[in-house]
């Protein structure tokens, strides 16, 4: 019997040293580490004596969050390379000993851990960052092994730690990937090697730069909790009046400088599609996962092109077009005042608002929910391409689960810290995860679960099927990874 446990989008970062409402979601009192450790301990008790693979399905670590330097959080846009990635992951792990120890217990029990890269922890594709995480996990597991800390025992633990740049496929045909490759603001054309032309630094996506240069600098929001960010227009105004009106943090300047840097960087980083890199990306994934090259190539065609290939889309997402429309409206209003004169000309002050409302109605910006729906639709196509028995994504932070025939389609949601308002108390409600079990008869069961109040509660699951009467003949189900055929290269 084999169990697959999937959690994602924890967004662990260096702990904010302050205690006020600024970046409250990163303060120690709000960390989900204890909840994660409790859930993993409960699962370990339930599967003792059986095999389990824990899959950390992307955005477990957040390299885009501010660094803590000299006792304060500092927003940054440091190069996305090993020189900066290794110190960042070392500091994150130092600040989360409970989480690290919980993973050590998983390894100490003889289970496997698979770490899949997401959009905020894409630096996990760097060999140096992987080596550091593996070493720290081995240290955590060996610290629990009073009976055997020999080099051989450490090597055995290291062999149960795996990294995946794009996706992971279990022997039970459960396919797990983060899901950001279907979001144009976070997508990479070549996720197995998402590097620049020199091969030393990871390409910056709009989503990554937007987090570093804009969202992280609005510290009274929790960027990983939609209930914190999504407000009414009146709610945004009141938020601004309370936290920014009488402060030195000028939202207009943050937006202007951040947007200018994002647009300039994306414009310089535009590159034409490279077929050779595409072929290498597909073949590398097939070798890493054991999937057929033809299936991986069909899968790669589902990717959303990166946002920089559709520059106008980036301009609209950053509201540059709206600001331009307001300026045009202001010019028209000033012209109206000059022509008509006072006092009737004062009506020209309404022109910018009227022009803005008219533009917003005629050319509405696609809502964020459309991106999440697109990611959900892709899962069903991925299941068909690979003949998967289950497909599990993350990225959207929206837990989902459905059994469609004998195929499970799910999203492992988010474990990131949540706060009741910028200066509220920690909100430890319900944390989702996917738990699938392949029994000795090859039947898949389980689904979406939640950790709530120290107890595992089922949400959308399929119970194990009752054992069928014995049959005279049975065809064994193969669990070996399919062989990669050389002629599959024709598919790409």
Image: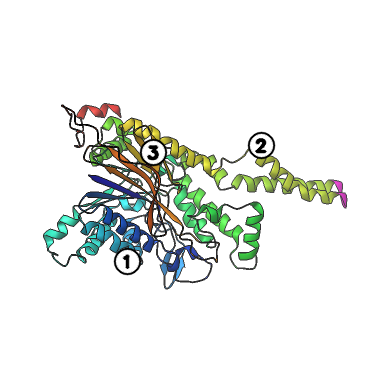
Q: Secondary structure at mark 1?
A: helix
Please indicate, yes or no, whether residue 132 appears anywhere in the rendered image.
no
Based on the picture, tell me whether residue 376 belongs to the magenta stretch.
Answer: no
Where are the magenta residues, as a range?
340-344
Q: Position of residue 70 (x, y in %)?
A: 42, 73
Q: Position of residue 458 (x, y in %)?
A: 39, 48
Mark found first going from the N terminus, 1 or 2: 1
Q: Position of residue 276 (x, y in %)?
A: 30, 35
Check disc 3 and report the residue beneath it: 409
- Could you tell me which quadrant the N terminus lies in? top left
Q: Residue at horizontal 36%, vertical 42%?
A: 392
Please indicate, yes or no, whether residue 353 appears anywhere in the rendered image.
yes
Q: Residues within 10 Å of mark 1 (few under 14, many from 20)?
A: few
Q: Nearer the viewer, mark 3 or mark 1?
A: 3
Mark found first going from the N terminus, 2 or 3: 2
- Which quarter of the figure has residue 462? top left
Check disc 1 and report the residue beneath it: 97
Check disc 2 and report the residue beneath it: 362
Q: Residue at horizontal 33%, vertical 36%?
A: 278
In the rendered view, does 332 fall on the left or right side of 60? Answer: right
């Amino acid at each position: 019997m084999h169990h697959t446990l999937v959690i994602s989008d924890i967004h662990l970062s260096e702990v904010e040293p302050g205690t006020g409402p600024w970046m409250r979601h990163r303060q120690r009192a709000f960390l989900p580490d204890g909840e994660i450790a409790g859930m993993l301990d409960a699962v370990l008790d339930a599967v003792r004596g059986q095999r389990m693979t824990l899959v950390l399905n992307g955005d477990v670590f957040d390299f885009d969050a501010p660094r803590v330097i000299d006792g304060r959080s500092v927003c940054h846009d440091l190069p996305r390379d090993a020189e900066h990635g290794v110190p960042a992951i070392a500091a994150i792990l130092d600040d989360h000993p409970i989480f690290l120890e919980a993973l050590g217990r998983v390894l100490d029990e003889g289970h496997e851990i698979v770490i899949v890269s997401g959009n905020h922890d894409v630096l996990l594709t760097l060999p140096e960052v992987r080596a550091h995480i593996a070493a720290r996990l081995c240290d955590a597991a060996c610290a629990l092994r009073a009976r055997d800390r020999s080099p051989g025992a450490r090597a055995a633990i290291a062999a149960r730690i795996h990294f995946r740049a794009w996706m992971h496929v279990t022997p039970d045909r459960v396919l797990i990937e983060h899901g950001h490759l279907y979001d144009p603001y976070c997508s990479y054309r070549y996720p197995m090697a998402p590097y620049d032309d020199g091969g030393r630094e990871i390409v910056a996506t709009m989503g990554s730069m937007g987090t570093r240069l804009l969202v992280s600098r609005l510290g009274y929001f929790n960027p990983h909790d939609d209930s914190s960010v999504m407000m009414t227009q009146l709610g945004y105004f009141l938020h601004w009046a309370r936290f920014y009106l009488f402060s030195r943090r000028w939202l207009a300047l943050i937006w202007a400088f951040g947007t200018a840097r994002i647009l300039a960087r994306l414009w310089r980083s535009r590159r034409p599609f490279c077929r050779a890199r595409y072929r290498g990306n597909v073949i590398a994934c097939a070798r890493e996962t054991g999937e057929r090259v033809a299936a991986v190539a069909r899968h790669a065609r589902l990717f959303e092109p990166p946002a920089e290939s559709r520059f106008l889309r980036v301009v609209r997402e950053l509201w540059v077009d709206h600001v331009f429309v307001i300026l045009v409206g202001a010019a028209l209003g000033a012209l109206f005042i000059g022509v008509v004169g006072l006092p009737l000309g004062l009506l020209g002050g309404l022109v910018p608002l009227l022009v803005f409302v008219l533009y917003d109605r005629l050319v509405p910006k696609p809502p964020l929910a459309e991106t999440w729906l697109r990611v959900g639709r892709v899962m069903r196509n991925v299941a068909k391409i690979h003949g998967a028995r289950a497909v599990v994504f993350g990225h959207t932070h929206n837990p989902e689960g459905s059994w469609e025939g004998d195929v499970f389609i799910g999203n492992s949601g988010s474990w990131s810290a949540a706060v009741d308002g910028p200066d509220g108390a920690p909100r430890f409600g319900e944390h989702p995860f996917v738990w699938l079990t392949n029994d000795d008869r090859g039947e898949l069961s389980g689904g979406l679960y939640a950790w709530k109040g120290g107890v595992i509660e089922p949400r959308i699951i399929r119970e194990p099927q009752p054992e069928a009467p014995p049959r005279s003949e049975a065809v064994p189900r193969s669990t070996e990874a399919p062989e990669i055929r050389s002629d599959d290269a024709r598919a790409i």
